[in-house]
């Protein structure tokens, strides 16, 4: 592995931006100082005018392996991740079979060790009958990111909404519990009512069926269980103004027992966008009315929302109810229906660029973006030696050109599903280079796949 000396970068870390050099040696950041000189061989990179950020840590992705590899694979999605400046990911258990046992979970780690260009961790899934596996997880809390509960919006044994089972899980788990909070009974009642009234449903009906009440009731329930047992709870993809009253900014992140996440698409889209984006932006929880987006932004900036993630969830265009016309444009298929359009969208390649676009608009500072996409994720999950530009830490780094816009085209996409809701748009920045563990894995729109990412470790 080569060593690198990055010269004259505008470093963004821990609330500050300053110009300095960075020496990368033996996978880690060895020295940060101006005008560094070394007496051994390094590859020198002139970063004048570029921003050097800690790599993004995405705490919620769906990479679909095993069992759903027609949509995505760990290899393809990790490749898309590093092209977007995401150097570490935490992947969800709703694969086929679901990762309900540590044995199945380890098979995912084995596969990632072989093919993932980014660093990785995988959640153990919660079922209605795997409490013994959760007990085993407690003994390995420094090796696995957490336990995932689908409290709504799932099927079969992945859906856990029995109060007795939930109480036992919260009482048992000593690791972080990440929850998808939606109330299945409210969703079903809303669907049946609207279906009876309209007959044929459309994309704009999604936030009516998966409404704010549905999200609030489930989040409130999860918090009650967590407070009862003093559990470490992390609620994923908050989407509503109403839910935000459940969260506080009164404590430093490290002292919080209950934290929450917002996803980039809920900061970008509103219910009005169903008119043009249709089922391409159908996701669970649903994108909702515009006042919710405004409230999410306010809570992000005042630290009630702790981290930014993607919930990257790729599906084939045909599964979304779309196809490409003769000009290569995305258009709805004649057979698309509300019921057969899958929920989820690919985002991992563009999350950082999208948020940096808001920096250029003056909506958020670059220091705050770094805090919410790197520092806070590392703190929230107690990730060892990552998420910051610090001497001694792993060199998970991203060089960004804030003055070079990038067009999103089908040819520019690396996710296996081959489409993006941002096709035809221009990102205001370019991800120039991505380092994972000191290895220059992505640069000049090319990859060096000779060295793979590593398994994340946790200080627990």
Image (cartoon, rainbow, N blue to C red):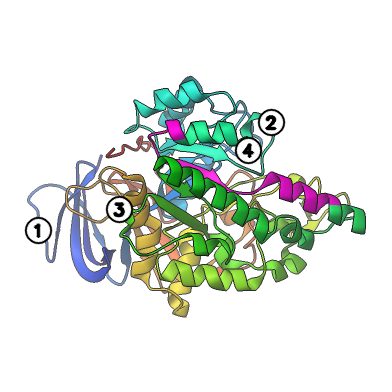
Q: In the rendered structure, find residue 156 and report the number of the disc placed on it.
A: 2
Going from the N terminus, do you reach mark 4 or mark 1 first? 1
Highlighted range, magenta = 171-192
How far is mark 1 from mark 2, CA to CA? 60 Å
Q: How far apart are marks 4 and 2 (CA)?
A: 11 Å
Q: Which of marks 3 and 4 is in front?
A: 4
Residue 55 in picture, x, y percent from top left: 36, 53
Dots 1 and 2: beta carbons under 8 Å? Answer: no
Front in this rendered view, residue 367 or 289: 289
Quadrant where the N terminus sits is top left
Q: State the residue position of label 3.
A: 254
Q: Residue at the location (58% across, 32% down)?
A: 164
Residue matched to label 1: 37
**Element type at mark 2:** helix
For disc 4, the marked residue is 161
N-terminal of the two: label 3 or label 4?
A: 4
**Of discs 4 and 2, which sits in the foreground?**
4
Image quadrant where residue 53 sits: bottom left
Q: Judge the density around disc 1: few (<14), some (14-19), many (≥20) Cα neighbours within 10 Å.
A: few
Label 1, label 3: how far apart the Cα atoms are: 37 Å
Q: How crowded is mark 3: few (under 14 residues within 10 Å), some or many (20 or more)?
A: few
Q: Which of marks 3 and 2 is nearer the N terminus?
A: 2
Q: How far is mark 4 from mark 1, CA to CA?
A: 59 Å
């Amino acid at each position: 592995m080569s060593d690198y000396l990055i010269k004259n970068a505008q470093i963004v870390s821990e609330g500050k931006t300053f110009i300095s050099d960075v020496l990368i040696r033996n996978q880690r950041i060895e020295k940060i100082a101006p005008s560094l000189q070394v007496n051994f061989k390094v590859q020198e990179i002139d970063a004048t005018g570029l921003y050097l950020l800690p790599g993004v840590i995405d705490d919620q992705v769906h990479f679909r392996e095993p069992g759903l590899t027609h949509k995505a694979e760990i290899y393809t999605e990790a490749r898309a991740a590093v092209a977007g400046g995401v150097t570490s990911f935490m992947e969800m258990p709703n694969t086929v079979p679901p990762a309900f046992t540590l044995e199945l979970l380890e098979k995912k780690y084995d596969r990632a060790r072989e093919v993932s260009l980014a660093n990785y961790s995988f959640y153990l899934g919660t079922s209605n009958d795997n409490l013994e596996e959760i007990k085993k997880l407690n003994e390995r809390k420094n090796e696995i990111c957490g336990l995932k509960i689908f409290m709504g919006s799932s099927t079969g044994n992945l859906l856990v909404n029995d109060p007795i089972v939930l109480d036992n899980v919260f009482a048992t788990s000593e690791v972080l519990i990440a929850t998808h909070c939606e109330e299945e009974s409210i969703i079903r009642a809303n669907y049946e009512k609207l279906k009876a009234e309209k007959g044929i449903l459309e994309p704009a009906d999604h936030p009516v069926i998966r409404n704010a009440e549905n999200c609030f009731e489930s989040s409130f329930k999860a918090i009650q269980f967590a407070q009862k047992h003093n559990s470490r709870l992390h609620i994923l993809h908050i989407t509503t103004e109403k839910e935000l009253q459940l969260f506080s900014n009164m404590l430093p992140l490290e002292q919080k027992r209950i934290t929450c996440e917002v996803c980039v698409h809920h900061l970008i889209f509103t219910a009005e966008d169903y008119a043009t984006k249709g089922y391409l932006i159908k996701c669970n929880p649903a994108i909702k009315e515009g006042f919710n987006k405004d409230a999410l932004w306010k809570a992000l900036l005042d630290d009630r929302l702790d981290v930014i993630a993607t919930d990257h969830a790729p599906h084939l265009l045909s599964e979304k109810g779309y196809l490409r016309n003769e000009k290569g444009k995305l258009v709805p298929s004649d057979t698309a229906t509300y019921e057969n359009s899958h929920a989820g969208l690919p985002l991992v390649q563009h999350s950082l660029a999208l948020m940096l676009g808001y920096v250029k608009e003056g909506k958020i500072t670059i220091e705050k973006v770094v805090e919410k996409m790197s520092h806070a994720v590392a703190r929230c999950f107690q990730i060892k030696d990552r998420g910051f530009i610090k001497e001694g830490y792993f060199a998970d780094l991203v060089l960004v050109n804030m003055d070079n816009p990038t067009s999103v085209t089908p040819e520019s996409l690396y996710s296996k599903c081959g489409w993006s809701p941002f096709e035809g748009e221009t990102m205001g920045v370019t991800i120039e280079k991505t380092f994972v563990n000191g290895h220059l894995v992505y640069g000049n729109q090319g990859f060096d796949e000779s060295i793979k990412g590593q398994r994340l470790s946790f200080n627990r």
